Amino acid sequence: MTDMPGFPPPRQRLLFRFGVFGLCLVLVLGVLTTRLFTLQIAGGGPSGGRASEARLTLQPIRSPRGLIYDRAGRLLAFNVPSYVVRVRPADLPLPQRPEVVGRLSALLDMPQQQIIEALDRNAGLLYDPVRIASDIPIEVASILEEEARFLPGVEVVVEDRRQYDYGPLVSQVLGYTGSVTPSDLNRLAGMGYLNNDVLGKAGVEATFEERLRGSYGVEQVERDGSGRVIRTVSVVQPPEAGSSIELTIDVEMQQQAEQALGWAMELIGLERGVVIVMNPQTGEILAMVSLPTYDNNTFARGISQDDYQALLNDPRKPLVNHAISEQYPPGSTYKMVTGAGALQDGIVTARQKLETAPYLEINGYKFWEWNRKGFGPMDLYDAFGRSAGTYFFQLAGRMGIDRLAHWAHQFGFGHRTGIDLPGEARGIIPTDKWKREVFNQPIYPGEVYQAGIGQGYNTSTVLQVLNAYCALANGGSLLKPQIVRRVLDNSGEVVRDFQPELIHELELDDQVLLELRRAARRTVTIGHTGNLVDMPIVVSGKTGTAEFGVRDSEGRLPIHYWFTGYVSKPAADGQADPEAATSELAIVAFAYNAKTRGNAATEIVKYFLQLHYGLEEDYRRVDLLTEYGGT
Amino acid sequence: MGAMRVERGMSDTFTARAPAASWRSFDVQLAFYALALAVLGLMMAYTNSVGAPLAAGSVFTRGLMWFAIALVVYVVAAAFDYRWLRTLAWLVYLVNIVLLIVTLAVGSGVGGVSRWVSIFGLQFQFSEVAKILMIGVLAAYVAARRDSMNRLSTLIGAGILMGPPFVLVMIQPDLGTSLVFVAVFFGILFMSGMRLRWLLLPVAAALAAFPILWTILQDYQKRRLLSFLDPSADPLGAGFQVIQSQLAVSAGGMFGRGLSGGGTGTELLPVQSTDFAAAVLFQELGFVGGVVTFALFGLLIWRILVVGWRSDDLFGLAFAAGVASMLLFQLIVNVGMVLGIMPVTGIPLPFVTHGGASLISIALGLGLLQAVAMRRTIPDWQD
């Protein structure tokens, strides 16, 4: 063998290296063939090497979600086993996906698109199961089990789901649970949520999610070759059940409130309405009804996209808790703020009489008394009782907008109450600064008048109005409204006992509050609330007629009706003193866009009270609930 | 010694004995083994197109299309006078670098990875072609330095040439392809007669650099690399494919389940048309099919070496060495991964993994080798 021309590396060396390369080639092929033999013929490899053989894996154990009770121990939310269909994307080969999705779609009666979207939206690993359908009938579950061989990656598991026995009655307070979304997972990163997990989405279920959930455990399971769990081998870490929660709500009162509100709404065709009942001494909410509402069981069962869209698009907003999440003009109920502030600031005394003219004129605009005639000279009690607008225009005008706002904030307006429910609104209390910031204009004198009677820019939540009157009823303590009474661990031990929580004491003399309680009682005794005075219980309060929106063809604005007040507690002698700050029941009713001659809210409150106190006589005045346009 | 002399020598070659391509010298063995492997790849594409393999856009029809393109590339490359590649080497090198930069800039991929570039709606992985182009560039370099194969400077020069494309592919990040570059680098220099003592230097350097390299790797790359050592440590995570792949292979047995036989699915991998395609091959064609596949690869690689040996210049030899090293390395890493004896890296198995760019680049490499075979002027050394 001779060197080739121009080949400085010796030919010998090159030949040797070719030999080395060839040897490597043979070696590599030998090793690969041996390994292939081991796997395919000799039966080596992982888990004995056969696809049909089992393997051990870890998986989470869900903790049972905490229960929810009412204050009397009635079970409101608990867990029931249900069949859930999941797909483990890692076990579903792409080419077979259309076939499997098609079969699932037919069995589950779901559009194929929805299944594909659920798979594609999956935020977790390929190996994490994706929830496709919840709460499927047992017949479908058994068909799926039988066809398991033709449905790779599909598994049917038993999972707890929420059951709400009282459904729509308490749904606004309880809320509901639902599947986590990718954005939930981002928000909750590091808190141990699984990509097919369930969490509280609204109401107490959402605010107390952390306590209700407990903590998940870990178990070791044996799976067969196709990934199905055969048995549990050991529990690595046991799950810890979630805490249970006892609400301040009394389901019986909740039912009475719903019955009263529902009756009026059906009678007049109201779009929305709210009733809240509270204990003014503790801030505990005894009933909170917002209608229309929804059945939270449909969410817990896995609501369909269509049903959810229908709820979202409903103009009456059934998913919104109108007691706390919407803000409305408080109207004349707000006159308590104006009156209390004026007394404290020495602008007027309770017995001092002011002229109430048919209207007050300012810069060419007329601000009318509601009866368009005026009431003549009036003291605070009568002006409050008759709800004389021109009286409070004068007080507001003398106080000025910023002082008025100060007293509004004192009563909790313009601030969230801090109730343990999601989505609370703040309301608007206008000031000169606020007006300049929002409208780039100063506040005008006429707007100060309007603010004095809770109109114009003023808005508040229904709960804020009630909470302000609770402060009046309990002698000047603004309390945080509470919805949860106790948290219990899974052995029934009280983990947390909620005590009344003071926001602040009102900067008002006891005498001022006493005068206002007298005025609130005058509303009833003067006959402004019709036959409410005839009921065998002592009620004080304030009506409200709040204008909103745009005028109709006859120049009238649509109105909301309010009534808020409290029932005086009978003393040892059986006599209830309306001037004492001992009331244990305060109530607000709100009727949205009510087209009735009389105050619908007052009728709702009357009905509630006669249901609650078991009065035999019916004080309801159906004649007042006819449409004002019709008579 | 100087560059001028090399240039003159080259032009001498062209004027004195530029041979015409002779289709009579067409190396039938070289073409046959490759064709057989390509057909095997098409069978895998067919079996993975469950449903309608003949429908437009299925894995199989796309495979057929790429196969047709690859045939054209092969024939054109074979007809091409490969010696021009030496003259154009610098241009090829520059184009190569530009393409890799373009891939980084506009490429798309899964999870922040930019490997794919879409051309006319087809996804194309340039780094696959870059491998063949770099083999050509390195071979041209080695051929130009044929008198200096004992010098360290030749090794350093080759390292400088290989550096930029290696880094560009590495930061895509495509760890697998960048490792192929390393294998090709050593394969060419070793087979071209580079002194062993110099060759051991970069090996030592690589070992020393390993800890640094490890810190550059993405977390998912590290997990994948390590998972083969103990797949059961994270059986639902990184170890999943390792276990799943071996289970699929072991289900094949002696004769396999037949094409599409694995279609019941659960034992298969979630995405078969990937680097784990060999698992499907072993499952459906069994041990026998696997051995046939290995044999075809062995024969092909050996034939490539023979063509290189018989070529009349160092370019042909080095080019053959590069292609052979590439094929052997990818075979080891890919099949080793599928069989659970190598870490998980994204290296395709030539012919079997359905990727257009992979097949085209192999066709280009083998076509150029065919050109080498058809243009040799000296008699076969064994003749």
Image (cartoon, coloured by chain):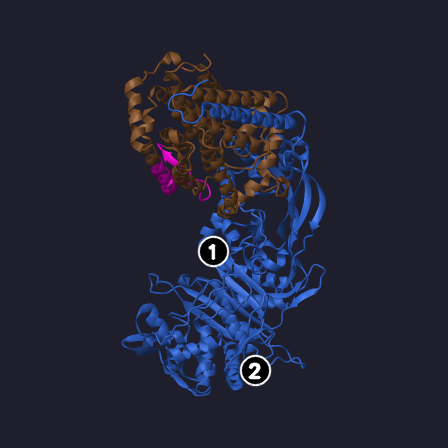
Residue A334's disc number? none
| Image chain in blue | A
The region drawn magenta spans B96-120
Q: Secondary structure at mark 1?
A: loop
In the rendering, at what x and y percent does residue A574 appear?
A: 66, 79
Identify residue for label 2.
A579
Chain B visual colour: brown
Q: Judge whether residue B100 is colored magenta.
A: yes
Query: How far is the residue under mark 1 from the one under mark 2?
Result: 39 Å
In the rendering, at what x and y percent does residue A95 appear?
A: 51, 30
- At a point 34% along the width and 68% down the height, the residue shown is A438
The answer to whether any part of residue A131 appears in the image is no
Tell me the quadrant of the picture where the C terminus of chain A can be found: bottom left
Question: Label 2 sits on what residue type?
Answer: Glu
Label 2 is found on which chain of the structure? A
Q: Judge whether residue A288 is colored magenta.
A: no
Label 1 is found on which chain of the structure? A
In the rendering, at what x and y percent does residue A604 appear?
A: 53, 65
Q: Quadrant of residue B64?
A: top left
